[in-house]
Image (cartoon, rainbow, N blue to C red):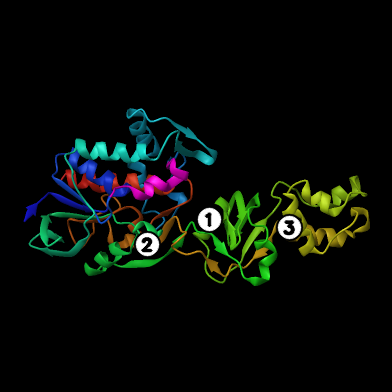
């Protein structure tokens, strides 16, 4: 039987950060993953360049049954703290839109950084070996791997959620959580493309067309690019709103968010000979403008169109209703919303309130960030919080 101070299950972003933190505080840590290599999701993120944080990350950018839960960990480990770590390793990075930070080179640099941090903490890695059983008795957790028992007074669930199953993602953390009597908020795919039904086939034929829009569901709005696909709607705007969307409810799209009130009437007054299709194509890709014009059933010179018809067209372009019939599911979801209930955890340490020594971090927890580096920042912050708590034991 091998004994440790802490066993971390899951060598993703949160698990690596937690293990490195506890290890560097003098704890003997075992980091376990069923995958053959660590950080697999990190490697594919950001198109292979890893959108490793967002400079604007704060609790308001996260979904959770408890919207305040993430404040403590995010407040104690900020984006600048991870930026400082990246800089210390000499990794070049750049900022894209909306505060998103990416490596200039490869996401492999972030994985290597985390592995070096683990090495500095003397962390033992056990990869390619799934845990077959987990028990708890006499203040110690026993994890059975390949028939051998490994024990520790601290166990960390950092195995994420079931999004991207082709990379080995599962709901393992939820099974363990339920074993210890924890509640699990219904998991669902998040940051995921929508699918459209046959009545929206016109838009599916626009596959590959992208345009900046404002998308709305209830009171939530995002302004970013939307992408039409052969199955429905994707792109940053749609991925963002998908995390909030509830099945069988519509989403509203403003195709021309920079246009003010009565802009079509102004165009009619100033350019009465201009074709309606031309007006749309001045602010939208040609094929999208043509498809919208076809759906609006308006054509010809603006001067020949009634003010009532133009107002109706403007209203619809400002709030075009789509009724997705679903999403592309966990296979295409970047993250999983829902997860281990925050009601069972300490927001300071990520420790389970009723089971001392048991922790849950990262995507396994019911905290889900926006698109654009927010989920990595939660991984770093929650991993650091749990790692420090273990290190201070």
Q: Are marks 2 and 1 in contact (CB under 8 Å)?
A: no
Numbered disc in front, either 1 or 3: 1
- At a point 53% along the width and 70% down the height, the residue shown is 247
Label 2 environment density (alpha carbons within 10 Å; few <14, some 14–19, many ≥20): many
| Circle nearer the N terminus (1, 3) | 1
Percent position (x, y) of residue 5? 12, 49
Q: Disc 1 versus disc 3: distance between alpha carbons?
A: 21 Å
Dominant secondary-structure state across the stretch colored magenta: helix
**Residue at label 1?**
239
Residue 142 left/right relative to 283: left
Kindly state the secondary structure of the residue where label 2 is placed.
loop
**Residue at label 2?**
162
Q: Quadrant of the N terminus?
A: bottom left
Quadrant in the picture for residue 157: bottom left
Q: Which mark is residue 317?
A: 3
Quadrant in the picture for residue 84: top left
Can residue 373 be seen here?
no
* Image position of 133 with respect to 45: above or below: below
Percent position (x, y) of residue 275? 87, 52
Residue 25 left/right relative to 305: left
Magenta stretch in the rendered image: 37-51
Can residue 368 be seen here?
yes
Percent position (x, y) of residue 371? 48, 50
Magenta residue check for 113: no
Numbered disc in front, either 3 or 2: 2
- At a point 26% along the width and 65% down the height, the residue shown is 177
Q: Are marks 3 and 2 in contact (CB under 8 Å)?
A: no
């Amino acid at each position: 039987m091998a004994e440790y101070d802490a066993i971390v299950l899951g060598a993703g972003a949160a698990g690596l950060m937690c293990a490195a933190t506890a290890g560097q505080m003098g704890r003997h840590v075992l980091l376990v993953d069923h995958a053959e290599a660590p950080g697999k999701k990190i490697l594919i993120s950001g198109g292979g360049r890893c959108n490793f944080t967002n400079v604007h990350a704060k609790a308001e950018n996260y979904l959770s049954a408890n919207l305040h839960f993430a404040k403590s960990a995010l407040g104690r480990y900020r984006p600048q703290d991870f930026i400082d770590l990246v800089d210390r390793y000499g990794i070049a990075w750049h900022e894209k839109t909306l505060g998103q930070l990416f490596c200039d080179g490869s996401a492999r640099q972030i994985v290597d950084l985390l592995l070096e941090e683990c090495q500095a903490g003397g962390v033992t890695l056990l990869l390619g070996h799934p845990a077959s059983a987990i028990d708890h008795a006499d203040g110690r957790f026993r994890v059975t791997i390949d028939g051998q028992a490994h024990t520790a007074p601290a166990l960390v669930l950092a195995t994420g959620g079931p999004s991207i199953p082709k990379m080995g993602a599962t709901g393992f953390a939820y099974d363990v959580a339920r074993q210890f009597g924890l509640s699990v908020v219904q998991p669902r795919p998040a940051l995921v493309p929508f699918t459209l039904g046959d009545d929206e086939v016109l838009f599916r034929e626009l596959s590959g067309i992208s345009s900046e829009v404002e998308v709305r569901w209830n009171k939530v709005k995002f302004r970013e690019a939307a992408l039409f696909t052969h199955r429905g709607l994707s792109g940053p705007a749609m991925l963002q709103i998908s995390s909030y969307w509830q099945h069988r409810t519509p989403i509203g799209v403003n195709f021309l968010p920079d246009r003010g009130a009565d802009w079509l009437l102004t165009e009619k007054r100033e350019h009465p000979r201009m074709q309606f299709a031309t007006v749309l194509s001045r602010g939208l890709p040609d094929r999208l403008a043509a498809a919208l014009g076809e759906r609006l059933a308006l054509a010809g010179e603006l001067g020949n169109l009634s003010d009532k018809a133009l107002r109706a067209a403007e209203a619809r372009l400002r709030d075009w209703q789509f009724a997705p019939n679903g999403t592309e599911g966990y296979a295409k979801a970047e993250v999983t919303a829902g997860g281990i209930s925050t009601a069972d955890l300490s927001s300071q340490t990520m420790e389970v309130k009723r089971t001392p020594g048991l922790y849950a971090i990262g995507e396994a927890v019911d905290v889900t960030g926006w698109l654009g580096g927010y989920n990595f920042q939660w991984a770093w912050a929650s991993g650091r919080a749990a790692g420090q708590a273990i290190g201070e034991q």
